[in-house]
Image (tube, rainbow, N blue to C red):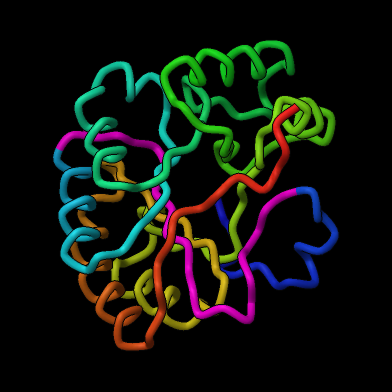
Amino acid sequence: MWYPDRLPDGFTKWFASYHWHGDRDEKTVYLTFDDGPTPVVTDYVLELLEKYRFKATFFCIGDCVLRHPEIYNQIITAGHAVGNHTMNHFNRWKTKEAIYLDNVKKASQLIDSKLFRPPYGKILPNTARQLRKQGYDIIMWDVISGDFDHQRTAASCLQNLKKNTTNGSIIVLHDSEKAFEKLKVILPDYFEYLRMKGYSCKQLKNTVATA
């Protein structure tokens, strides 16, 4: 599945009800990690974040939290934010709305957060409205690393991140087994780059008033 490395602001303005990036005038980026928690992989990410004193947001799959609650708790204890990524990584375009919303609800029983990222970035307007009524802030992104794509090299992912990261960027990475080999190459160099460029890395916060 192909995604553009960076989404232009002109595009994201058409979907203003979604959260695509932060303040463009502030030298801050928002690192996000999808599809965990995963043994070894999430541990590695947490150790590196601690080393650089960066904060991040982890969009967790409920089933992974159910299987690895100790890692989920480590994320919280370390001061990072968490978000709901559904219970079973459902694709809204291929799932009936009632089933999809129920899957989000099941995940919410394990993940204490009103931040929501739809798997694959795929959601439909009515579903988004339903979630926003429940107080969810729907978090998308403007920069995607490509670490999940087996056709890309770690070097190309790293080049992509360095080229496209800018003030306020929400950046998608994955703390999954599939992405781990690339992460081990990408993250140390990318984190060093962010520090050298003077970026601060913060957790995302909900901007939607709870209903």
Q: Residue 145: x, y in percent? A: 44, 63
Q: Which residues are magenta?
A: 18-39
Drawn side of residue 120 relative to residue 67, left or right: right
User: Does the stretch in magenta take in 192?
Assistant: no
Q: Residue at x 59, y 70 (%)?
A: 6
Between residue 85 and residue 199, name the one nearer to us.
199
Q: Residue at x 66, y 42 (%)?
A: 138
Q: Residue 209: x, y in percent? A: 72, 38
User: Does the stretch in magenta take in 34?
Assistant: yes
Between residue 84 and residue 174, name the one nearer to us.
84
Q: Residue at x 25, y 35 (%)?
A: 38
Q: Residue 114: x, y in percent? A: 58, 33
Q: Residue at x 44, y 54 (%)?
A: 203
Q: In the figure, residue 20 lies in which quadrant?
A: bottom right
Drawn side of residue 19 relative to residue 69, left or right: right
Q: In the figure, residue 66 lies in which quadrant?
A: top left
Q: In the figure, residue 51 lies in which quadrant?
A: bottom left
Q: Is residue 167 above or below residue 69?
A: below
Drawn side of residue 25 relative to residue 166, left or right: right
Q: Is residue 148 above or below residue 211?
A: below
Q: Residue 181: x, y in percent? A: 20, 55
Quadrant the C terminus occupies: top right
Q: Is residue 86 above or below residue 81?
A: above
Between residue 163 and residue 193, name the one nearer to us.
193
